[in-house]
Every structure is written in structure tokens, then in C-alpha cells.
Image (cartoon, rainbow, N blue to C red):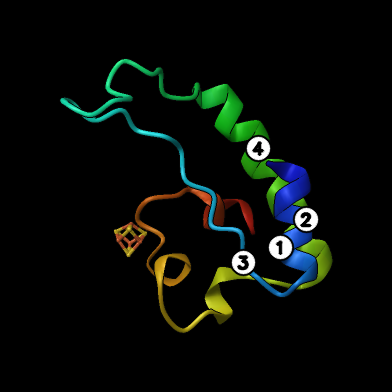
Amino acid sequence: MVATSDRLIQLGVYPFVVPFVPITDTPLAQHPAPSTEFMFALYQQVSDLLQAAGMTSERIRAGCAKCGACSALSTFER
Ligand code: SF4
């Protein structure tokens, strides 16, 4: 995920990383959600890449990266 995020950033795409959330009555209902520790480490690594590229969610005008409700990534940009 970090390598793919880096590739997206190099293309100018903000990698809006969202933790998986199992939903009842779906095929992945029993699939475990990622741990807080996993997401923390992932967000730190992706935010380092974003900072190195000078990319922030604040500069995005619309979409999920602008909303930010489903991901904590933007809080790691600071
Ligand atoms: S709540 Fe916000 S971040 Fe989540 S899917 Fe909707 S627009 Fe995207």
C-alpha cells in the first residue's frame, strides 16, 4: 500500500487511504478490520510521502480527500 501510494503521488493523485470496515450481510462481513497500530504506521508512511511531494488534502477542492470523514490521513499531514 505504501509503494502504491507513492506511485499515485508521483502521478499527482492523492492516495486517500481508508481502513477496511466489515459490513454485516456482505461477503467480507467476517473479515477483520485493520488494527489501530497498523493504520497508524500506514498513515505515517503515506503522510511522509505526501509531505515530501508537497501534497496536502487542504489543497484539494472536492471529493473524499476534501471531506476526510472516512480516513485519518489528513491529521498525519501536520
Ligand atoms: S463520507 Fe466523505 S470521505 Fe467518506 S465516502 Fe463520503 S465523501 Fe468520501
Callout 3: helix, strand or loop? loop
Toward the bottom, the furthest residue is 61
**Are the residues at dot 3 and dot 2 in contact (C-beta closer than 8 Å)?**
no
Question: Residue flagged by tag 2: what amino acid is it?
Answer: Asp
**Are the residues at dot 1 and dot 3 in contact (C-beta closer than 8 Å)?**
yes
Q: Residue at 77% across / 52% down in the picture?
A: 48
Q: Residue at 67% across / 32% down in the picture?
A: 41
Q: Dot 1 corresponds to which residue?
A: 8
Toward the left, the furthest residue is 25
Q: How much space separates mark 2 and mark 4, taking CA atoms?
A: 12 Å
Q: Dot 4 corresponds to which residue?
A: 42
Cβ of disc 4 within 8 Å of ligand 1? no
Q: Residues within 10 Å of mark 2 (few under 14, many from 20)?
A: many
Q: Dot 2 corresponds to which residue?
A: 6
- Nearest to the eye among marks 2 and 4: give it: 2
**Are the residues at dot 3 and dot 4 in contact (C-beta closer than 8 Å)?**
no
Q: Dot 3 corresponds to which residue?
A: 14
Q: Quadrant of the C terminus?
A: bottom right
Question: Residue flagged by tag 3: what amino acid is it?
Answer: Tyr
Q: Residues within 10 Å of mark 3 (few under 14, many from 20)?
A: some
Measured as percent of width and height from the top left, residue 7 is found at: 78, 59
- Along the polypeptide, which appears first: circle 1 or circle 4? 1
- Nearest to the eye among marks 3 and 4: give it: 3
Q: Residues within 10 Å of mark 4 (few under 14, many from 20)?
A: some
Q: Residue at 17% across / 26% down in the picture?
A: 24
- Nearest to the eye among marks 1 and 3: give it: 1
Question: Residue flagged by tag 4: what amino acid is it?
Answer: Leu
Taking the image as shown, residue 26 lies to the left or right of residue 21, namely: left
